[in-house]
Image (tube, helix red, strand yellow):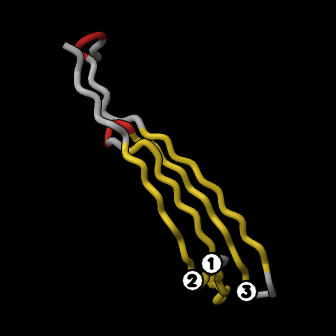
Amino acid sequence: MQTSGADAVTTARATRGGMRYDHDLQKTLYAFGFFDAENDLLQLLDLRTVAGAGAGAAMGGVLGVQSSMLLDLWAERKRAAVAQSPRE
């Protein structure tokens, strides 16, 4: 059953995206950087950004599955949306 018009209720409206770059330093060591952004007005989140960087070491693998150890640092910033009261 679908509703429309005044009876419609929005239960989710989020937008997320991000990117990551890895760079091999040596055969088993690598460095990486990342950036993520998120928006969810239903939860009063106007914009959240996260940026960070780190390093990793390949620890070996079994049956084609590679395992790594990571160390990362990141910073997060949030900007809250202003709640709007319903029109009368």
* Vertical side of 9 occupied by 66: above or below: below
Q: Quadrant of residue 87?
A: top left
* Location of the N terminus (image quadrant): top left
Q: Mark 2 sits on what residue?
A: 71
Mark 3–mark 2 Cα distance, whole angstroms, equals 12 Å
Q: Is residue 50 left or right of residue 1?
A: right
* Location of the C terminus (image quadrant): top left
Residue at coordinates 49% horizontally, 41% vertically from top-left?
A: 15
> Judging from the image, what secondary structure is the residue with disc 1 in?
strand
Residue 71, horizontal then vertical, whole percent = 57, 83
> Judging from the image, what secondary structure is the residue with disc 2 in?
strand
* Vertical side of 87 occupied by 79: above or below: below
Label tally: 3
Neighbor class of circle 1 (other Cα within 10 Å; few <14, some 14-19, many 20+) is some
Q: Mark 1 sits on what residue?
A: 54
For marks 1 and 3, the one nearer the N-term is: 3
Residue 69, horizontal then vertical, whole percent = 58, 85
Question: Which amino acid type is marked by label 3?
Answer: Leu
* Vertical side of 31 occupied by 88: above or below: above
Residue at coordinates 74% horizontally, 87% vertically from top-left?
A: 28
Q: Which mark is residue 29?
A: 3
For marks 2 and 1, the one nearer the N-term is: 1
Residue at coordinates 27% horizontally, 18% vertically from top-left?
A: 8
Residue 22, horizontal then vertical, whole percent = 72, 70
For marks 3 and 2, the one nearer the N-term is: 3
Neighbor class of circle 3 (other Cα within 10 Å; few <14, some 14-19, many 20+) is some
Query: Residue furthest toward the left?
Result: 88
